[in-house]
Image (cartoon, rainbow, N blue to C red):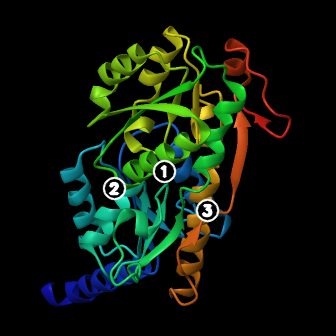
Amino acid sequence: MKFNSIPVILSVIILLSSCHTKNNDVPVVGFADAFEDATISQAKAGFMDALRENGFSEEKNTVKVIYRNAQGDIPALSQIMNYFISEKVDLIGTNTTLSTITALQRTKTIPVFMMVSPTPERMHINKDEKAPQNLFGAAEELAYIDTSFALMTKLVKPKNGKLAVGMIYNQSEPQSADALQKIKTLASKLYVRVEALPVNTSADAQLVTQSLLTKNIDAFFANPDNTVFASFETILKNCNQKNVPIFTSEAGLVKRGAVAAYGADIYQWGHQAGEQAAEFLKNKSTEGLKWEMVKIRKKVYNPEAAKKYNISIPDDFEAVN
């Protein structure tokens, strides 16, 4: 009886072995969001759609996606990356700056496809003026901020002769600190007074915004800052109560209540990174791939917000609801 059971046992082992081999043929993607946010989530949607359009779908079992959200917790983000590495993922999708930097700190070999992140130079991750060899995806520069910021000088009437613009920024975020310095330089040329206050976390956003609104500002500028993204509804509520319109360089924030923006389309940003990731999965090689600048930017406005503040928007801006 025991002898006769051996073929059965061997059959089970072979079956399990063949299943394991099949599963190994399915690529594994680790995707990390740094925090929960309605605008940022559009990048993830774009990334996953790009994979699906190129034949990599969880529904069809042609890819496995391990998704994690750090909820703004940096130690948790480190643990997420360590988990991805232990699971031997084929690539890592990183949504926002903190995810990208943390991934690159943890691995030098697994390809990292970034989105909603500034250039490697802005993230201060270049070595000998070169970006990490395993960094891909799409990044944005700060040049487009000039157009967004200057828009306020054309559309907002100052109360006291000189336009006053308020900002909050997280000084621990490289792109946020760089953006503030760029804006201050531009503001001096445009005869604009900038009032900027630091904020450490989204939990501090309400008190800091309320403090900023006591400084007699004419408009609020939502700069490319993850803390601003995460606390935007709080900022919007307080600004609306004081009749202060919000302008931004981030197109995704317009749908959430900002008046207007000229900046990257967040969904398309993620889609662009996803196209690169799909190419890697198809070829199983990073040859010919390199990180790129964002390709699609939009001029958009929120009709309801524009009406509230009686602001006439230029004809070349697209309405979003």
Question: Can you say which quadrant of the picture contains the N terminus?
Answer: bottom left
Residue at coordinates 36% horizontally, 73% vertically from top-left? 89
Read off the residue under disc 1.
182
Badge number at residue 98: 2
- Dot 1 or dot 2: first in sequence order is 2
Q: Is residue 29 visible?
A: no
Badge number at residue 242: none
Give, as a three-letter code, the residue at label 2: Leu
Q: Is residue 268 left or right of residue 227?
A: right
- The label nearer to you, 1 versus 2, is 1
Residue at coordinates 37% horizontally, 49% vertically from top-left? 177
Give, as a three-letter code, the residue at label 1: Lys
Residue at coordinates 39% horizontally, 56% vertically from top-left? 97
Task: Categorize mark 3 by other alpha carbons within 10 Å: few (<14), some (14-19), many (20+).
Answer: many
Residue at coordinates 61% horizontally, 48% vertically from top-left? 146
Read off the residue under disc 3.
294
Real-space Cα separation, disc 3 to disc 2, in angstroms: 18 Å
Q: Is residue 54 visible?
A: yes
Image position of 79 with respect to 131: above or below:
above
Assign a secondary structure to mark 2: helix
Assign a secondary structure to mark 3: loop
Residue 87 image-quadrant placement: bottom left
- Dot 1 or dot 3: first in sequence order is 1
Give, as a three-letter code, the residue at label 3: Val
